């Protein structure tokens, strides 16, 4: 664990440094840089793992951006925090000698939301993203071109936190930006189920083969 680059974070080098593959792992509310490392390694075997801890505290619980209430956000603050994370990734590319064209994100809940925002405002930072239980938290005013990028969205049919309409709006936003979107609905609430980790791994294996 280190506090360099603006975020407390963990970095685990790739098993095969020549592969150049990195998974940016982004936890949910109350998590930290250790929470999703195991899932990240299951989803992207052998890849480098870059796992930052959110810089915002909500009643002591780390997050990547604050919320005004459940499902209510300040667009300016969300964008600012996404730009902050994008700078962290750029710095990590230099510090850890990562291939900037082979970085994927794996985010859960709040981590998924910051990952989607980074993609929408800073095309090219991430080659693609696995978004587990995401919702639309920021809609850029400028049109972005995400051609060549891919997104895997796993949403819960019984999720009490994320409205179905928010997931559908996020999918539409990515599709309008020409990203390749895969949407999977789970018979689940906000918690993850084992099958979607397997589905995410299968999806990422296809994406890694195409890069």
Image (spheres, rainbow, N blue to C red):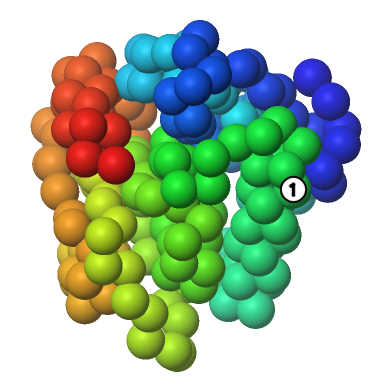
Can residue 99 be seen here? The reply is yes
Picture residue at 36% right of the left edge, 57% below the top: 135
Q: Position of residue 51 (x, y in %)?
A: 62, 30
- In the picture, measured across the screen, residue 101 lies left or right of residue 63, that is left
Picture residue at 54% right of the left edge, 19% below the top: 17
Q: Position of residue 156 (x, y in %)?
A: 22, 40
Q: Nearer the viewer, residue 18 or 174?
A: 18
Mark 1 burial class by Cα count in 10 Å: few <14, some 14-19, many 20+: some
Picture residue at 22% right of the left edge, 32% below the top: 209
Q: Quadrant of the N terminus?
A: top right
Can residue 32 be seen here? The reply is no
Q: Position of residue 112 (x, y in %)?
A: 44, 46
Q: Is residue 70 above or below residue 79?
A: above
Quadrant housing residue 86: bottom right
Q: Is residue 196 above or below residue 16?
A: below
Q: Quadrant of the C terminus?
A: top left
Please tell me whether mark 1 sits on a helix, a strand or a loop. helix
Q: Position of residue 123 (x, y in %)?
A: 45, 67
Quadrant housing residue 149: bottom left
Seen as rendered, the residue at the extreme front is 18
- In the picture, measured across the screen, residue 159 lies left or right of residue 9, that is left
Mark 1 highlights which residue?
91
């Amino acid at each position: 664990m280190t506090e360099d680059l603006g975020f407390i974070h963990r970095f685990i080098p790739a098993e095969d440094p020549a592969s150049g593959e990195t998974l940016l792992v982004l936890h949910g509310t109350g998590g930290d840089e250790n929470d999703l490392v195991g899932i990240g390694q299951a989803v992207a075997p052998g890849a480098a793992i870059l796992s930052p801890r959110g810089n915002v505290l909500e009643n002591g619980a780390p997050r990547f951006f604050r919320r005004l209430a459940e499902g209510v956000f300040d667009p300016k603050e969300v964008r600012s925090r996404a730009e902050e994370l994008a700078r962290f990734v750029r710095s990590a590319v230099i510090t850890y000698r990562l291939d900037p064209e082979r970085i994927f994100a794996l985010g859960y809940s709040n981590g998924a939301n910051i990952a989607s925002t980074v993609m929408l405002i800073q095309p090219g930072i991430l080659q693609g993203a696995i978004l587990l239980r995401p919702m639309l938290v920021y809609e850029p005013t400028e049109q972005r071109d995400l051609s060549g990028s891919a997104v895997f969205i796993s949403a819960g049919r019984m999720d009490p936190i994320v409205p179905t309409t928010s997931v559908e709006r996020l999918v539409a936003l990515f599709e309008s930006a020409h990203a390749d979107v895969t949407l999977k609905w789970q018979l689940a609430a906000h918690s993850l189920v084992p099958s979607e980790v397997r589905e995410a791994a299968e999806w990422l294996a296809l994406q890694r083969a195409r890069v």
